[in-house]
Image (spheres, coloured by chain):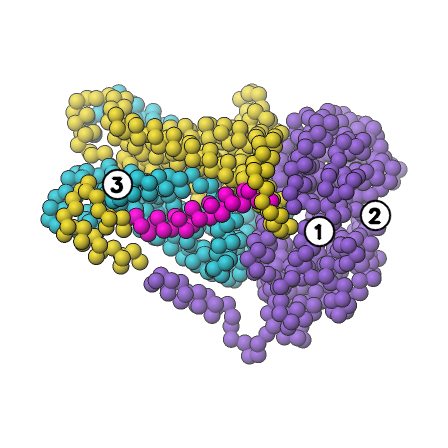
Chain colours: A yellow, B cyan, C purple
Amino acid sequence: MSGAILPAPSQRTATTGSGIGMSAWANMFFVLPYIIVVVALVIAPLFLGIWLSFQDYDMLGGWAGGVAFENYTNLFSDRIFLGTIRNTLLFVVMTTPAFVVVGLFLAITLNSHLRRHAVLRSVFFASSVLSVTVVTLVWRLVYLPNQGLLASVTNLLGLPGIDPVTSETWALPGVAVVTVWWIIGLPMTLFLAALQQIPKEIYEAAALDRASRWATLTSITLPSIRRTIVVVTLLEVILQFQLFGQALLITGGGPDNRSRPMVQFIYETGFRDLQVGFAAAASQVLFALMLVAAIVQFWVGRSRDER
Amino acid sequence: MKIRTPSTATGDRLILLAVVLLAAIWIAPIVWVVGLSFKPNEVLMRTTGGLVSPPFTLKNYTDILNSSAVFGWMLNSAIVAIGQMTLTLILASLTGYGFARTNFPGKRPLFLLTLVALAVPEQAIIVPLHTMFATLDLHNTYIALITPRLAFPFGVLLMTQYFRAISPEIEEAALLDNASRLRIFIFIVLPLSVPAQATLGIYTFLHAWNDYFWPLVSATRPEMYTLTVGLASMQTNFAQTEGLGFLMAQAVFAGLPVLVLYLFFQRHIVAAVAGAPTR
Amino acid sequence: MKIQKVFAALLAGTAAFATPAAAQPKTEITFARFFGACEADYGNSQDVAHARGECGVMTTLVNLFNATNKDNILVKPQIIEWGPYYQQLNARLSAHDIPAVAVMHSAQLGDYVRYVEPLDDMLKEAGIDAADFTPNARNAVTVGGKIYAMPWDTHSWLWHFNVGLFKKAGLVDAQGQPIIPTTVDEMIAQSKQMKERTGKNYIDIATSTPGDFANSSRSFYSWLYDQGGTIFPSGYEKADFKSPEVLAAIRPFELLAKAGTITRGLDSGGGLSTFLNGEAAIYLSGTWRIDDFLAAQAKPDSPLHEGYTTRVFPSLFKTQTVWTDNHTWVLPKGGTNPAQHKAALVFIKFLWDHNADWARGGGHLPARQSLMAGYAKLPLRNFIVELTNYGKALPHEARRQFGFQSMIGEEIANVINTGKTAEQAADAMQERSVGLLRGR
């Protein structure tokens, strides 16, 4: 599709002598197809959503006209919604470092084509192929009060029982553990891909210098994949802000609203209670939070880059 | 790299031990899923333990295979997942290269647009998106199932980042030979990005294959169902209590193709370590 | 461009597979429902009389209709998982992709009333006698004096008893039947006695996920109606959770939680297995579970072998009522052309004629008064058959019934699982009800 569009303009690029780093209109054709897709399928619906957030719109009851900022003022006086902001931020703070650290550890340890490493990589990836329904079904069995696997283990070790389903303290960490278990494969694989870009010679030189494992890690490996660490962190923040199914299906957002994420709130108001305008307003708050998080991280990553 | 002192060998072993232990924790719930899938549903109503003791059954799997529609759903899922994966890889690679290696007017604002798009939560656009496709009368088509996911800003970000890390000298030499940018991209840069392509590929495929809500509201004719929607439609209203084994068999059945695909892809993610000539 | 052509070709191919060349054109009608698909067990079976379970009966009924109807009608089921069924239906309505016949809970009918055909005249045309509706079914499908759906059943809320544990706890009468408590105090005393004598929990209820929240709200509504209470004392735009009746309907959960005689944090599977394993005396669930427990009782190794019975969710207050809901069939507006409309009526008449099969195989109470005597002869049904006379649901005028059910259930789950008081739960319900009823 795009192959048909591109050759001619870029040929011209070459003949007009635009070298690396030189600006040319023709180079825009590399990004144009994607920009069109993004504008049509993300930006346009986003603006529709923003418009909806200023309406009183019920999916079945119909449209009752504009309400200015009423949906937003209602949101910020809604105790449940405010709780979901707290839960979502906490969840991002709990899971993102875990994803980066564990993912990095696994990638560095399993970065070889030894057969046993390939098998282990598959093990850590395998949980990702399961749907959220099945993941939560199994973990509900693990978390079952008194009878579940977790209760059996803590009993056996004589530890105080941890009961994520009925404890205000442990509900969100319980959901976080499931999430890390479910999709650790993604950061692991992303880091693995990045590690392939480190030239082998650098390691060989380090080995000849008898550099310690720790020195190799901190002075070669980590700096080389620094950009990927930023990108993976950014991705995990974006993904974990959108926590939904695991919380809904393990704790139902409870107990006492201690694990209900923002997306669950959006789902319940929009799709269950049909208050589309109100849900759209909540979506925009989530969008704003994610945008701020993304820009801050991008900016931090960039400024380190330039130093 | 292979030169080892005794202390690093011990360290290696300790780390491997830690990973193996972690892997054991990781695989336990999966073993449970597979085990449950071979147990009769009636037995599981009473207990979900006792996986190694009989009775066992294949009925959960034969129930899936005996559904006349299941292979049609699988074909739909394959078309959607492969279509989404292929188109996403093309779009993300082209765009990533454009952002990483070329200059053009408006590059910074357009890159910023990508960043903004990255932060748009799915829930914020699903209702407008559904309305748009309804207006265009595109529901119940592969186009409606595939296109909404093509705008995948993370893919662009990943490829941009990956292309940036490739040494520019390689390209500069080719540019001096007057090769076109597209030729350089396809024949020189793209082959160097195989690990990133494989990673992005497996995850777009996985995401498309497991997607549930969009296919549910877009493909409403049973002949257009994807595997996830189709399998879920077979569940009775009390599936989680009276059809647990069946649910688990569905999970294994639907998950296996992706796992096999990963086994294939992962060679391309890590093989470069040994095979690729150093740059 | 090219890709679109490939898609078009693939689409055409799929369509060709889906519609085999028929000798004469059939009138096809779409039939949106949940209840699952069970081709493996029932395939093309038309043996309705021996079908078991909701899925089995629905599948064989459609098979039978497609094979035997004289009007050349083909019913095409569009089956969807029950969980997201209404979300999908909303999406279909907004996209004008409308099924000819669709299943709908009567609790949802109020929200959808402007989207479905009024059926008074059509039922007559189809030969369905609305005079045969049970009082509960009639209420369930009537909105503002008009009938908007064909009722298919009544399902309701019960106590399922492990009679063996009741015997062990000394809580049976001379006939060996469980003594049913008639006040809150009696119930709490029974629960303590049960715990002391058997070590088991008295009440077994699932409270962990949104699907389970219905369990506590159904119980709440039943106890509220028993007192003649309501959450809508002054119109349906404002709910009131501050009345003494509301507090009294939540209180039993607080007391059970304080006494430590109710299960905490179980999901639906955990709740069911707890009862099947003899770990709790009373399981709170619906009419749909009776046959499962009868089957368990028949097995010699089952903890229920010593005895299983059931009663309508007991009143602890002045009158006996109980929460009910109904499966009904609606004809969404715009789902048919005139020929399909006629076909849809023929199909629902066929369903009407097989209401007894649904009640027997699916386990629910029939929607037809004339079938009640026969239904009462099924095991244990004599204890529950009366409930179609006094069973109660929220009026159709009350909006967001799904939202209310989840919200109330969640707050009561908090009482059970985290030790909130009835007052705290009622306050939270009051606050959350405002948000639910806001806007159009």
> Does label 2 lie on the same chain as label 3?
no
Q: Is residue A23 left or right of residue C81?
A: left
Q: Residues within 10 Å of mark 3 (few under 14, many from 20)?
A: some
| Foreground: disc 1 or disc 2 | 1
Look at the numbered disc 3 and give the secondary structure of its residue: helix
- Image mark 3: chain: B
Q: Residues under labels 1 and 3: Cα distance?
A: 56 Å
Label 2, on which residue? C390
Q: Residues within 10 Å of mark 1 (few under 14, many from 20)?
A: many
- Image quadrant where one finds the N terminus of chain B: top left
| Foreground: disc 3 or disc 2 | 3
- Image mark 1: chain: C
> Does label 2 lie on the same chain as label 1?
yes
Q: Residues under labels 1 and 2: Cα distance?
A: 20 Å
Look at the numbered disc 2 and give the secondary structure of its residue: helix
Q: Is residue B50 left or right of residue C389?
A: left
The residue positioned 42% from the left and 39% from the top of the image is: B119
Q: Residues within 10 Å of mark 2 (few under 14, many from 20)?
A: some
Sequence-first disc among 1 and 2: 1
Disc 3 vs disc 2: Cβ atoms closer than 8 Å?
no
The residues colored magenta run A30-56
The residue positioned 67% from the left and 75% from the top of the image is: C70
**Where is residue A151, by image quadrant?**
top right
Disc 1 vs disc 2: Cβ atoms closer than 8 Å?
no
Magenta span contains residue A44 = yes
